[in-house]
Amino acid sequence: MAEVRFGKAINLALADALEQDPAVFLFGEDIATVGGPFGATRGLHERFGDRVRDTPISEAALANAAVGAALSGLKPVLEIMFMDFMTLTMDALVNQAAKARYMFGGQASVPMVVRTPHGGGISAGPQHSQCLEAWFAHVPGLKVLCPSNPADAYGLLRSAIADPDPVVFVENKALYAMKGELLEQPEIIPIGKARILRQGSDVTVVSYGAAVHIVERAASQLAEQGLEVEVLDLRSIQPWDEAAVMESLSRTHRLLIVHEAVEAFGVGAEIAARIGEVGFDELDAPILRVAAPFVPVPFAPSLEKAYQPDAEAVIAAVRKLCA
Amino acid sequence: MAEVRFGKAINLALADALEQDPAVFLFGEDIATVGGPFGATRGLHERFGDRVRDTPISEAALANAAVGAALSGLKPVLEIMFMDFMTLTMDALVNQAAKARYMFGGQASVPMVVRTPHGGGISAGPQHSQCLEAWFAHVPGLKVLCPSNPADAYGLLRSAIADPDPVVFVENKALYAMKGELLEQPEIIPIGKARILRQGSDVTVVSYGAAVHIVERAASQLAEQGLEVEVLDLRSIQPWDEAAVMESLSRTHRLLIVHEAVEAFGVGAEIAARIGEVGFDELDAPILRVAAPFVPVPFAPSLEKAYQPDAEAVIAAVRKLCA
Amino acid sequence: MTMRKNAELLELYEGMYLIRQVELRLGRLFADGEVPGFIHLSIGQEAIATGVASVLRPDDTLASTHRGHGHALAKGVDLDRFFMELMAREGGMCKGRGGSMHVADLSIGMLGANAIVGASIPIALGSALAHQVRGVDAVAVAFFGDGAMAEGTLHESLNMAALWKLPLVFVCENNGWAEFSPTSTQFVAALDKLAKAFGIAYEKADGRDVQAVSKASERAVKAARSGKGPRVLEFTTHRFRGHYEGDPQKYRSADELSRLGEHDPLVLLESQLIKTGVMEAELKHLREGVDVRVEAAVERARRGGAPDFEAGRADVYTQMGAA
Amino acid sequence: MTMRKNAELLELYEGMYLIRQVELRLGRLFADGEVPGFIHLSIGQEAIATGVASVLRPDDTLASTHRGHGHALAKGVDLDRFFMELMAREGGMCKGRGGSMHVADLSIGMLGANAIVGASIPIALGSALAHQVRGVDAVAVAFFGDGAMAEGTLHESLNMAALWKLPLVFVCENNGWAEFSPTSTQFVAALDKLAKAFGIAYEKADGRDVQAVSKASERAVKAARSGKGPRVLEFTTHRFRGHYEGDPQKYRSADELSRLGEHDPLVLLESQLIKTGVMEAELKHLREGVDVRVEAAVERARRGGAPDFEAGRADVYTQMGAA
Ligand SMILES: Cc1ncc(C[n+]2csc(CCOP(=O)(O)OP(=O)(O)O)c2C)c(N)n1
Ligand SMILES: Cc1ncc(C[n+]2csc(CCOP(=O)(O)OP(=O)(O)O)c2C)c(N)n1
Ligand SMILES: [Mg+2]
Ligand SMILES: [Mg+2]
């Protein structure tokens, strides 16, 4: 058991995957020689040589190359430097990767992973901060993961790489420096399983990625005020763990969903819609969402602070649910 | 008053916009000389010359060129032949067009329209049939429209072209041949206003695009069975007319949302989530959705038929709501 | 001309005739409503698919286009499963889910026709990358049309292929048309100069002449296989039919249409074979053999059952269904 | 050298020195935490922005990159509003919403720095298209780095610019680096050959020499303005600083770093000016004038108020907020 940073956990997962499976191949802009803009791939090129490769700035072709490689015996792991640049890879992911298995009659799998950081908080501005995971969750054939801590980052990334299907693996950049425990033999975490981070009987709060920590802060403060919040970390967005949410709701009868992405048409919308349907009789209050407003991510720190969902907003929403 | 086809209504709207505003400029693949693969731009090149231009097969640059043109005095209307190819234009729409106004401090508007057909029913297969409007509705700065009949197609397209902001204008390909009334001086239809197509007191069914006709068929059949369905055509997806939905719900207390796009993380999710929140006390039953399953659009007619939401599914859902 | 040479030529003739006969048959089946969707025939272009594939091994891979029947057949897909696919049967190579634009057989390196213009290129690039990383001496082939040259993926892929010395052969089938427009009205660069800009060896040959195609391909594939990096091939050819079946081709001059026969690769090869002493009766017998095979495949396809939508859901993912 | 010529040269010197001084100041402000986010300085490359802009009219447009301060300043943006933007104030040219990577002033044709590598090119293409369609004789300029050449947008834009004979000048600032990698490890084509492949006239000049830049630009802009179509310019240059501020540049040799001073465009121009009889005291005075302006702008920016998030919501759309 050791304390490692989130970025290091990613690094270890990649190293272990490269070590254990010769089909694993890493590529992306500046990931090899300098180890990636966030350092997540540091040392891997030195250790695994040409299986960790720097690429030109050609996201569209890179992502489609991942599809072709996955159809030809590799397990490519592509890094797209910022999730905003996933805009350039949509044909590859949506028209090709997501559909190949179904559309070819189940002949083949497309075992590829695209790792990409989302999220704000570093004044990176409107084109370097977006959380676009809802797009991918809407596409049959894709899986979407988003860990909130080092152990999950390791365990989910190992699952993603081992998975036969295309996975969009989203890393919140605010988390890279976060420290957390990692076992000597770290756990592999299955795709599609949420985790209860904190038990509580008053309200269920569902979240994923960095927003989980906002929720935990809010939950601590609410506990002091006598409100017991159950905190669920989804970890996997597509598929997402409906059973776990329902199970919790059946005890709390109140649901709040929190994420950093824009609220409108975001991930929370599906969870609210679905639970609003199957959990209708369990609900003692409307399902609420705390998420980003319908505005691009602004650059100025003061603006970004006002933009990002925070613990206060979570507290207010929980209070409203319990009023 | 005359009967015109949906495609012709589009054509007339484009012609009138070109006629009235010299800044309007049409471009896209095969739209000029041959008048577009669906004939929507037929005759316009002959009439307006180089303001209606054929382009190379370069969707990514075309869409960004529309942004640059819109920032430099034109009102470009770009045709993307199938909505599946919008995957190639995401940077332009999401990082550039949607953000320019806000991110430049309100200095400029981006008056551009991207017209694109979505939807299945013609065995065009997994890469020529997708309904991806939920993606664009999730992006602050974009507007998303989807008409269900010729008069709306005309009126909404005129609004879209006149609008100072970027609009994704979605045309369901199954509708191109549909006939409907169009006034001599056709109405301009404001963005963001839904329309009640049929009044009813038992259930509100919200829909848009071609799915509206499925709903209408279902409503007629249900009326024979004594269930009165109120049918709302959203017309505008972003922004969408929450007030109109709430108003109807306050009378029916039951809500169903129907669209051709995939249900999970689709447009209906946001409507259900939002109305589930603000309309919680009005609801006598869970909000239901009838939409496509989580599967790529298959080619075989028999598969596609099983895939697409139909009147039977709507009827079943309405019955369930009223049980 | 040696006997062996003659046998080889006859084999090429049979391959070309098979494609011709299959596609003529498809044209009639389409007109009769037995093939749904839309189909792009490669009639007139058979020498390219046949000549290129004649120098490929089963473990060599190819990525194809919307006009991909010939590529699939030349690579050796099963005729029964091919017809069943286009006729939307469960027994189709893609179980009726892909149709004409997605015919694929991963087991013989046919990575699929593709409905996205330009996508075949980076997919083949990725396949070549896999060959290289896995240390096998297989080669990947990217088929693309002249219209596809305008897509940025060509540029990105030429660069990466050259940069990494990938075993990739770019094959441009230059039929002068991109849908309904002469490609000369869309794309200004010459492929030889483009290839040269990236330092890639280029060769052009008459796409009507299967021997020329085969020889050029042999040189290119040999170079790619032996680690000399990518090659670009351009074959001039003629699209005998409309862009898709049902296209009235008003945009083509009567003169052009009437002279297409002069460019028939089968006629050219026949007269060559006759010159080398092959008897017309032998050719006729060979053709009849193909005719019988094709007709039998059509008959069997007709008897094939319709695909089952519900069963197909299991193939959206390899490992599990979505939530 | 005439007096007029001298005055012109001095003006160029002042322009270059302004960029230098602004960016040095930004570097310190960044280090001190007064400029948030990340900033890419163009120190060493000032002669390009200055030389190109010196031949542009106010109605000429330019689209810029992530390294866009120099382009913005050379085009004539207001210094106060520039610093306020980077220092995240309400008075910023983008009201603090864009920051370094989005500085823009549409009123003088500065269409924005851009955080998406490669996007400046098609945006400028669209601007040139607007000039052409509107029948004005303005010219558009696309700035891009050598690393951006790997993006497909370059290819697509070269083609359309040539095809339509657009008044577009492509300006490649070739500093040899793409982030942390030598561009030679990423891109194999030479731009002259690429331009040639598209039939576009190309000119290369020493980007350290503002007169050379200005002369080459003058020829290119003149040609573009007079309907002769696009031109490609490539300027060799040197990036004096890290990719962004704070970049320790471990990937660059000590030798390279120590010799950067030899390539200083300001030093080169100074010695030239001295040779033509300008006194060092005159230059010193001119520099001091700039220093004072810069310092005053910084001071005013420091006093600027923080932007207001709520007020900014009104700018997401021009016409109306979303639902
Ligand atoms: C990305 C994309 N854009 C547009 C289309 C529509 N489309 C299908 S085929 C075609 C023309 C392709 O021309 P070419 O590459 O020369 O192939 P050919 O049809 O001549 O075989 C176009 C524009 C598409 N399928 N995909
Ligand atoms: C689409 C996209 N991919 C990657 C990046 C990350 N990135 C920012 S600058 C840069 C290198 C650009 O190199 P070059 O074009 O030569 O410009 P320079 O930094 O040398 O001025 C990269 C890869 C980005 N901003 N956008
Ligand atoms: Mg062609
Ligand atoms: Mg550079």
Image (cartoon, coloured by chain):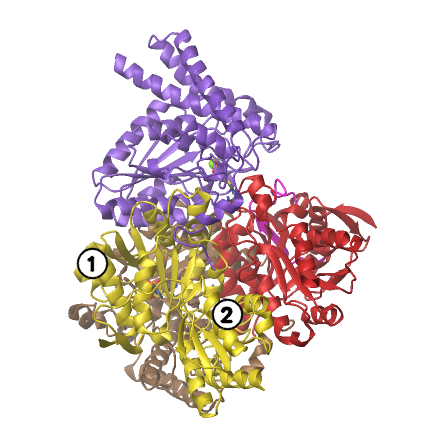
Chain colours: A red, B yellow, C brown, D purple
Q: Nearer the viewer, residue C185 or D135?
A: D135
Question: Residue C227 appears at what percent x and percent y?
Answer: 52, 52
Which chain is indicated by disc 1? Answer: B
Q: Quadrant of ligand 1?
A: bottom left
Question: Residue C35 appears at what percent x and percent y?
Answer: 38, 82
Question: Residue C167 appears at what percent x and percent y?
Answer: 50, 55
Q: Nearer the viewer, residue A253 or B138?
A: A253
Read off the residue under disc 2.
Answer: B246
Give the residue at the far right of this rendering: A1
Q: From this view, report whether residue D205 is shown above or below residue A6.
A: above
The answer to which quarter of the image holds residue B189 is bottom left
The answer to which quarter of the image holds residue A256 is bottom right
Question: Residue C296 appears at what percent x and percent y?
Answer: 42, 89
Q: Main secondary structure of the magenta part?
A: loop
The reply to whether the C-beta atoms of the residues labelled 2 and 1 are less than 8 Å apart is no
Q: Which structural element holds mark 2? A: helix
Based on the picture, tell me whether residue A292 belongs to the magenta stretch: no
- State left or right for residue C316 relative to residue C297: right
Q: Nearer the viewer, residue B97 or A98?
A: B97
> Tag 2: Cα neighbours inside 10 Å, few (<14), some, or many (≥20)?
some
- The residue lying at 37 percent from left, 34 percent from top is D234
Read off the residue under disc 1.
Answer: B19
Image quadrant containing the N terminus of chain C: bottom left
Q: Amino acid at mark 1?
A: Glu
Q: Can see residue B242?
A: yes
Image depth: mark 2 or mark 1 in front: 2
Q: Which structural element holds mark 1? A: helix
Q: Which residues are magenta?
A: A20-40
Based on the picture, tell me whether residue A38 belongs to the magenta stretch: yes
Q: Can see residue C208?
A: no
> Tag 1: Cα neighbours inside 10 Å, few (<14), some, or many (≥20)?
few
